[in-house]
Structures are given as C-alpha cells and as structure tokens.
Image: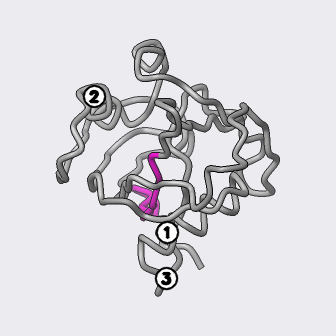
Amino acid sequence: MDISIKNKNCNFKAKAVGLLCVKNKLLLVQMSDAGFFALPGGHIHIGESSTDAVVREMKEETLLDVKIKAPLCIIENFFDGKMGKYHEITFCYIVQLLNESNFKMEDFVRHDIEDGKLDFRWFSIDELHNVDLKPTILKEKILALNTQFEFLISTKPYHGTM
C-alpha cells in the first residue's frame, strides 16, 4: 500500500525518484497526460524505505537494475494538480546501473496500469534547459550541477499531475 492520503482539502504522497546519468545523459519520464517530464520513480509503500522504493520503482518502470550512489535531496512540494491541491515529499537519489557493459541507451515507451503511457527519454544537461522538468526546483539543482545533499521546499504552482 502506497503512502498516500487524500481528503477534501489536499492529497499527500511520499515518493522516491532516481537521477540516472549514463554517458552524460539523464533519463527522464513523461506520463501520457502530464505534459512535463520528471525523474523516474514512484510511491513509497508503507513500511518500505525510500532507498528500497527507488530501486523497486526503477526496476518496475524501466526494467533497469540500479543501486543507490548517493542521496541528492528531499523535496517538499506543494502544487495544484488535476485532482486538486497536493503536498508531496520526494526523496531524490543519484542512482547508477548495476551493469553498464551491455546497456543500450535508447528512448523507450512503457505502458503502466496506473500511470498509462510512460515515455522515457535521455537528455544531455544542455538539452535540459529546454525541457519542462518538474518540480522546477529540482531542475534548477540539476542544471547547477549541485550534488550536495539539500532539503528543498517548492511552492511554485504548476498544473498537471506528478
């Protein structure tokens, strides 16, 4: 069961996401109805650590086996989405492939029962300037090449779902 609470005023969820960089390109995902990109990952289950969640979610969504390299940040994010107001806590980790030797870097699409179409694409840091990556505060951190662990709070409104 996901760590997710919904009431009439707000939706709360806890997520874990992974920043995967291979050959100077970052893997991002766009959900079919979102209109923006995000780091791959998803909900943390009750009783599951955020590190276990990001490894599990990366495997479920991308079929890639990863390991945690380092914590990147924790983001407390407040935003308006299609289903109302959201309060989200996201644990962001730098992850790396367990085995890069036979890895082929290609864009790909997966279909998920809950999220619909998941469009995975690889972007260079330079290309990231022109990509709508949410939350924006995370994009700013990545573009600054800032890998120092931080706790970030984002209250910049945007519309869509994460």
Magenta portion: prevailing SS class = strand
Q: Which residue corresponds to the image point at 44% horizontal and 46% vertical from the top-left?
A: 19
Q: CA distance from mark 3 to mark 1?
A: 9 Å
Q: Is residue 84 above or below residue 13?
A: above
The residue that mark 1 highlights is: 4
- Give the amino acid type for the residue marked by disc 3 in the picture: Ile
- Give the amino acid type for the residue marked by disc 2 in the picture: Glu
What is the x, y in percent for residue 150?
17, 51
Q: Nearer the viewer, mark 1 or mark 2?
A: 2
* First to last magenta residue range: 6-19
Label for residue 140? 2
Q: Secondary structure at mark 3?
A: loop
The residue that mark 3 highlights is: 46
Q: Is residue 152 within the magenta segment? A: no
Q: Which residue corresponds to the image point at 68% horizontal and 33% vertical from the top-left?
A: 33
Badge 1 or badge 2: first in the primary sequence: 1
